[in-house]
Every structure is written in structure tokens, then in C-alpha cells.
Amino acid sequence: MKTLKEIIAQADTDGVAVGHFNISNLEGLHGIFNAAKGLDLPVIIGTSEGERDFVGIHEAVALVKALRENYNYPIFLNADHSYSFERVKDAVDAGYDAVIYDGVKLPFEENMLETKKCVEYARSVNPNVLVEAELGNIGKSSSVMDEIPEGVATDETFLTSVEDAVRFVETTGVDLLAPAVGNMHGMLKDGHNPKINIERVKAIREATGVPLVLHGGSGISDSDFVEAIEAGVSCVHINTEIRVAFKEGLLQGLDEFSDQIAPYKYMKPAVASLQKKVEERLRLFNKK
């Protein structure tokens, strides 16, 4: 089986993107895995710090590893948005396939130093662990919002610059970079997030030489997804959309099976709803 690094490199070559979807429970994991397996596409499972605390860091590793080994399937686990070296270290030590150090709130120089520290530690433990960093403010929320959060970089002058991206990658040695290119975490209630600056995506990808990751995928238009992937995005993160789909399915299940108390009965519509959304996104990300 190919490593995650090889799979992302292949996606970059093929002009497609690997889907990254977060989980908070076993039902979400099943929905994502079933969607990916049904389409025969690799997939990355993400757990944020909060999701790791809820699911269990070692439990998440065991669950994903079991699916990968039992089905001989390319499913991988990423420690999404770790805000300290200690949380990155915990994930690397636990056996995660990839980690993200998010130091965007730090001054640029300090962000680089902390990111480099994370890269060096991951390499010392397992050279196959991918390390990603975020550069530029795209917010932190994975929720449905009334308006764009204060400080989120959607105006062109505040997007990640090509010069900063090049220096950051060269100094830190990260495998993947998640720049601010008009994207934002979370999703606006009207369902239409700001447009992606495709030219900035292309310029950063060409200048840095590393695959790019698009965070805050929920609410981005299909056309922006396709153009961003063509421009150099090789991995797309989705969380808010599948949380919404899961909740809608769960409410449907509780209504349809109101006389039931067995979770595996009223949870089925929730898994199905999430699975359908993941399938839609995976098809789009792999559209050639």
C-alpha cells in the first residue's frame, strides 16, 4: 500500500485532491469510510484537539489502523489543528499518520520556529509522518455563522503572500502548506463562502514546490473547488458540512424511530446522510 505522502504526491500529479473529513464519533468514521470505499478512493480522517479529547487519541489511531489493516485500504489519520508542540508530540507518539501545527496566531518568525521544531520531532520518530502548517488567518470555527469572523483574511492584501510562503516552507521543511487564499473555517448561513483566489493558489504552489491543502472547504462553490485543485490544491478539508449532514440525519432518525431506544437504529439515517455528503465531495475532488 502507498504511504500517505505517496498518495498526496500522486493526487498532485493527477490534478485531483484527497478528501480530509473530521470525526467526533464511530458513526462518523463509518460514514466516511463507507463513502470512500464505495468509490475506491483514499481518504484522510481528521481529529481536531477537541475531537481527539472526545474520541480518545489512542482510540482514534486504533480505529483507523484496524480499518486500514482489515480491509487493506488507504485510510489515514491526521491530527488536525494542533496549537502547541506538546499536542503535536502527543499525536506523533500515538501513531498518527500526519499532524498539523497551527501557529497562525503567533508572530511569523515564532510560527516558523515552532513549526520547524514540530517537523524535526516528527522526523526523528517516524520519517513517514507528514507535517503540515497553516499560514494566514482563516479563523477557527467549524460552525454555521451569520458573517465572516473578524480578522479572517479574505481581502487580497491580507492573503498569504508568495514570498512568506516560500520562506516558511524553506525554513521549516513542512510537507504540506495550508495558506489563506480566500478560504475560511466554518460556513456562512447563506451557504456561499468567499471566493478562492485561484491565482494566489497557483503562484504559491509553483513557488513553494509543496502540495497545498485547502482548509475551510465547507461552503466553497463547486467551481472554486475544481479550479483550486487544478491550480495546486492536493487535499481538501471538510468538517462543518458533514456535521450539518449528520445532525439533519440524526433528527430524521429520532423522528422516524421515536419508539426506539437502540442507537444503532435511530443513528442509521445520520450515518447515511453524512456518507452521502462525503460521496458528493469525493466525486467532485476527483473530477478530471
Image: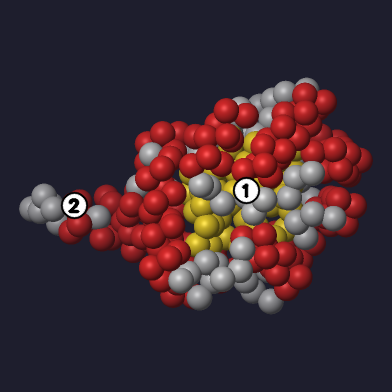
Residue 46 place in picture, x, y as percent? 51, 48
Task: Give the residue drawn at x 57%, y 34%.
Answer: 89
Task: Give the residue drawn at x 45%, y 64%.
Answer: 68
Sequence-earlier tag: 2 or 1: 1
Q: Residue furthest left?
A: 259
Identify the residue under disc 1.
126
Amino acid at circle 2 = Pro
What SS does tag 1 mark?
A: loop
Instruction: Specify whether 218 is left or right of 24.
Output: right
Give the crowd class for mark 2: few <14, some 14-19, many >=20 residues within 10 Å.
few
User: From what the image shows, is residue 105 above or below residue 122?
Assistant: above
Instruction: Specify whether 114 is left or right of 56.
Output: right
Q: Residue furthest front?
A: 124
What SS does tag 2 mark?
A: helix
| Residue 78 appears in the picture as rendered | yes
Instruction: Determine contact: label 2, label 1, CB under 8 Å.
Output: no
| Residue 249 appears in the picture as rendered | no
Q: Give the quarter of the image for residue 269.
A: bottom left
> What's the image's color scheme?
secondary structure
Q: Which mark is residue 108?
A: none
Q: Quadrant of the N terminus?
A: bottom right
Residue 249 place in picture, x, y as percent? 31, 55
Near-viewer residue (51 or 203) = 51
User: From what the image shows, is residue 214 above or below residue 66?
Assistant: above
Task: Give the residue drawn at x 51%, y 47%.
Answer: 95
Identify the residue under disc 2.
263
- Tell us which disc is closer to us: 2 or 1: 1
